[in-house]
Image (tube, rainbow, N blue to C red):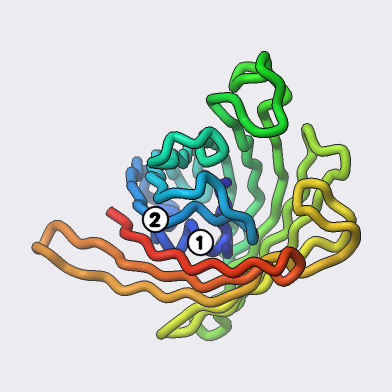
Amino acid sequence: MRITTVSKGFVLILLTGLMLSSPAIAQWNMGLDITSRYVWRGFEFGNSPSLQPELSYAAGGLEVGVWGAFATSGDPDGTEVDLFASYTFETDAGAFSLMVTDYTFPVHHTGLTGSETWFSSKAHFIEAGIGYQGLESFPISFFAGMFVHNDDDNSVYLELGYGHDLFDVFIGMTPMESATYGTSGPGIINMGLGTAKTFKVTDSFSFDLTSVLSVNPYAENLFFVVGISL
């Protein structure tokens, strides 16, 4: 599932390196990530390598787009298409963002009945969120998101990150009982560190190699994901 700040907040930004365009420039952005696994907020989907394309349009502080994940195994649990929109305010204290994401599943998904495909409202999970990205002198990031549609618990996710020249660290938790995050109360579900390195092939082409080591302490799961961003 797509995150626009630290973890599909951190993981997506780490893998794609997408930044909003200059306020004076409007542009289209396209990218493709190839990852060893699709891991989102402490949970793995698809049990196979994942192809993750993205197409977005940015103008000023506004960005709208679509992000997808497709398990190479064909597992529907790893197949996803998300629509998103965000608006970022640049200030002397850092960047503040408002965002909404419609997580959708274009094929039958675990927990949905046979009639609940992408065109069913029950296949859409809408999250509203806010984010903060600090300045280079204060490399702290924060994300808070709450599901406002198709989640009886209105599940909340909070994540704090710190960026370093060599690596990034993050910790995410839910402050409540949540069926979405598999918790019976408050719990840390996503923490770890990641690193990225850019390889220049020609003057006009380069790619990023990334790695993320993360753990879900609540579910007692450990993940190590490597990826290439084109």
| Image side of residue 28 versus residue 123, left or right | left
The quadrant in which residue 94 appears is bottom right
Q: Element at badge 1?
A: helix
At horizontal 57% and vertical 40% (from top left) the residue drawn is 85
Q: Is residue 56 visible?
A: no
Position of 227 compared to 100: left or right? left
Point out the frontmost of discs 2 and 1: 2
Q: Position of residue 111 (x, y in %)?
A: 72, 32
Can you identify the residue that label 2 sits on? Answer: 35
Q: Amino acid at mark 2?
A: Thr
Tag of residue 11:
1
Q: Earlier in the sequence, mark 2 or mark 1?
A: 1
Q: Residues within 10 Å of mark 1 (few under 14, many from 20)?
A: many
**Are the residues flagged by discs 2 and 1 in contact, CB closer than 8 Å?**
no
User: Is residue 146 in sight in this rendering?
Assistant: yes
Residue 128: x and y, percent? Answer: 72, 45
